[in-house]
Image (tube, helix red, strand yellow):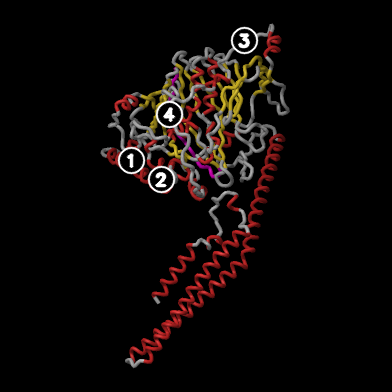
Amino acid sequence: MKGRGCWETASVRSFCSSGCLNKFKKDDSGDDDDESTTPTDKSELHTAIKNLSLKLDDLNTCNDLIAKHGAALQRSLNELDSLRIPYESSEKLKAVNERATLFRITSNAMINACKDFLELAEAHSRKWQRALQYEQEQRIHLEETIEQLAKQHNSLERAFRSSVPGRASNPTQSFSEGSFLTPKGEDSEEDEDTEYFDAMEDSTSFITVITEPKEDRKAEGGTTGSVEWTPADNVLDSASLVPQEPPKVKRRARIPDKPNYSLNLWSIMKNCIGRELSKIPMPVNFNEPLSMLQRLTEDLEYHHLLDKAVHCTSSVEQMCLVAAFSVSSYSTTVHRIAKPFNPMLGETFELDRLDDMGLRSLCEQVSHHPPSAAHYVFSKNGWSLWQEITISSKFRGKYLSIMPLGAIHLEFQDSGNHYVWRKSTSTVHNIIVGKLWIDQTGDIEIVNHKTKDRCQLKFLPYSYFSKEVARKVTGVVSDGQGKAQYVLSGSWDEQMECSKILHSGPSSPSVDGKQKTVYQTLPAKLLWKKYPLPENAENMYYFSELALTLNEQEDGVAPTDSRLRPDQRLMEKGQWDQANTEKQRLEEKQRQSRRRRLEACSRGCSSEDAEKEADVYTPLWFEKRLDPLTGETACVYKGGYWEAKEKQDWHMCPNIF
């Protein structure tokens, strides 16, 4: 009987290893794309039945061998039975004979059961195919019904708002075709977000009328408040904004293709609603092989806008280029829905590109909860930029909000112009159903604290029902006296233009009583245009040319540099299972470091004070200072990194990897 069990186990393993049974299992994971949910066609079904038949032939062969050897065994037993043996042995021999007979009967029954299974599979294959087809049709019908309901809801809401005076507007949530849509109501749990999107409802707060330069100069005669314009001016000429110098150092132009790993996002995220995303352990399957420090450095891709702004004699013209630079930092996010690696405490990233880009950049992770990174950039072309960005993110069930907190400073050495602004909110939609997509929303105000020039930028949220261009950005640049000088328009994923304002005035009141400012402008000039993505970018996480080089291995960097992070390197190579194991090791090592700090702080302190002390980290290359312009405390570069690199003296660096 023991031999029988081994034979059955081997047969079952052989049968299951073929993968034939998997053809008939229903996949409930929900993480397949639209192509994988199509019904199994006839050829696939025939292949599955053929494989089952082959396995049945194998079982028949085994059955024949069992019958053959079983008959030989019984003959041997009969021969033993004819011999004169003691009574006890005779009884045992009869028992063995009976068991051999039962074994043959059981094997025959198993073969018959397998034949029945094959017949049932053949009989029900068409039925399963029709059932799958029906489920797909029902899904399509449900999506179409939801789309119709969304349109009806939008129409009813507009009618209700127009019929009730003073009714607060509440636009429908952004909608992507083929996805579930839940309108935001007054009783929604997301009151803060509802108010935020309400404030963004109006598409533009002004109207522009383009005027040809010659015609306008005739109209300018005797008009007060006219603005002088030099057609020969080329500071904002688009042709001069494209860098002409070829790169001096050859960098890599590709990374290994992204493996085709499927993972159900909702199965992991459904238990994390309302929690801080940085505190949720996530596998690398949701990541891209770059750290947040490297993503922050990507903001410098269009640094040539600032190099050009150095030469502006007009502060409002310079503001136009600074505004275009602030918008350009979002251009790579349109396809980048993957999460960057959350840096380890004390992790750094340097970008030493004095020869290539004329700048040096350094980032350091200065806090883990909440995640915060300090960044400093020096350009030999006459400007410097610094910021401390804290990432706050919340999973709302239908979408994910990512809110970068902190001010960005930009200073031009020669003029002393000092600009300050903050980043907008990023929202990842279709977390539950449909294709993930990202949107940028919010208002950005850029202030020149020397001249008091201001730029108001508005990132319009995408709406399925809007007639506006997707990902649209509008803005107005005003001088220190508050007079509008330039109109900005474009999209955060493509390009930005500016138009010189000649005259402004109020429009006629609309039906709802609202007025917009009408700006009479000269034809627009291109400020910035996005670089095309590299070939095969869709298989390389949609990285730009700069992003492809950020994780390239370099000699001489600090031992805390993101390029040396092992789990990130393994992921880039496509070894995701090993990367997940390494990621868990690094996170546990970081938790152990915190526990040691907590134990050291707990001596002579209350538990609450010890918890606070344990979360305090003293950065190596940055220090906390009070920002006189914003009144906030932020980490500012204190120096020493590049000197340490020149000496290759990294003894002060923590062992975090």
Q: Are marks 1 and 4 in contact (CB under 8 Å)?
A: no
Marks 1 and 3 sit apart, C-alpha to C-alpha, by 61 Å
Q: Write down the residue under mark 3.
A: 228
| Residue that badge 4 annotates | 388
**Residue on which disc 2 sits:** 579
**Tag nearer the camera, 1 or 3:** 3
**Mark earlier in primary sequence (4, 3):** 3
Q: Secondary structure at mark 4?
A: strand
Query: Which one is earlier in the sequence, the residue at label 3 or at label 2?
Result: 3
Three-letter residue code for mark 3: Glu
| Closer mark to the observer between disc 3 and disc 2 | 2
| Direction left: furthest residue | 604
Alpha-carbon span between mark 4 and mark 2: 29 Å
Q: Position of residue 70 (x, y in %)?
A: 44, 80
Quadrant of the snapshot with the C terminus: top left
Cβ atoms under marks 4 and 2 closer than 8 Å: no
Q: Which residue is mark 1?
A: 594
Q: Estimate how packed mark 2 is, as few (under 14), some (14 to 19) or many (20 or more) residues with alpha carbons within 10 Å.
A: many
Q: Which residues are magenta?
A: 382-398
Q: Is residue 521 left or right of residue 292?
A: right
Does residue 439 lie above or below 502 as drawn? below
Kindly identify the amino acid type of the residue bearing the numbered disc 4.
Answer: Glu
Q: Seen from this angle, which residue lies furthest top?
A: 222
